[in-house]
Image: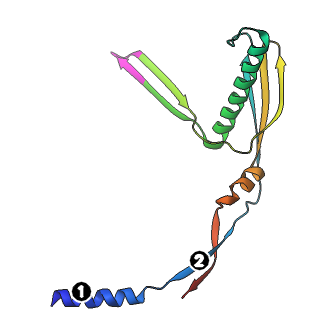
Amino acid sequence: MKLWLSLVLSVLLVGCAMDRHVEYEPIQPDSFPVLTATGIAPLSAQLGNNDEEKMRRAMRAAKLDAYRELAEQVYGQRIQSSSVVDELVLADDNFRAQVDGVIRGARVIRSYPVGDSYITEMELDFRTVWELYQQRPRQRIRKVTYY
């Protein structure tokens, strides 16, 4: 009897299910901020056999430093720290910062040497980021059609 009743209820519930088609439309933000970042790398500390190779390495390091700064602005920093106190005296203190993220659409504004350093200035326009992500946009429901 229980089996028959559960079978009848299952058939009735399945019959109530409707197919539907949902249409989405993208939502454009009201404003698009522009973030800027500056990366700095020392020239003399770079590994290399000559000045040109050290310059190329410093250029790359400065660009990566600027990307790191952009990632910090977009995603934030993860901070981990620990302190050990032994008999009310600070015995050990550790601190670690980490950045993790993907930056798309950034562009180099300026790149130039200053003294013993190489500097790269970058910007990230969120209008460009929004346009890049239109392949997978944030959406809201425009229309639902039930069949």
Task: Looking at the image, tell me whether mark 1 or mark 2 is earlier in sequence order.
Answer: 1
Q: Is residue 110 above or below residue 90?
A: below
Q: Is residue 47 above or below residue 133?
A: above
Q: Where is residue 73 shown, x and y percent of the image?
A: 67, 39
Q: Which mark is residue 22?
A: 2
Q: Residues within 10 Å of mark 2 (few under 14, many from 20)?
A: few
What residue lies at 64% left-to-right and 62% top-to-bottom?
A: 138
Amino acid residing under circle 2 = Val
What residue lies at 17% left-to-right and 87% top-to-bottom?
A: 2
In the image, the segment drawn in magenta is 83-91
**Residue 10, quarter of the rendered image:** bottom left
Q: Which mark is residue 6?
A: 1
Q: Where is residue 114 shown, x and y percent of the image?
A: 83, 17
- Residue situated in front as seen by the camera: 56 or 142: 56
Amino acid residing under circle 1 = Ser
- Residue situated in front as seen by the camera: 37 or 89: 37
Q: Quadrant of the C terminus?
A: bottom right
Tag 1–tag 2 contact (CB < 8 Å): no
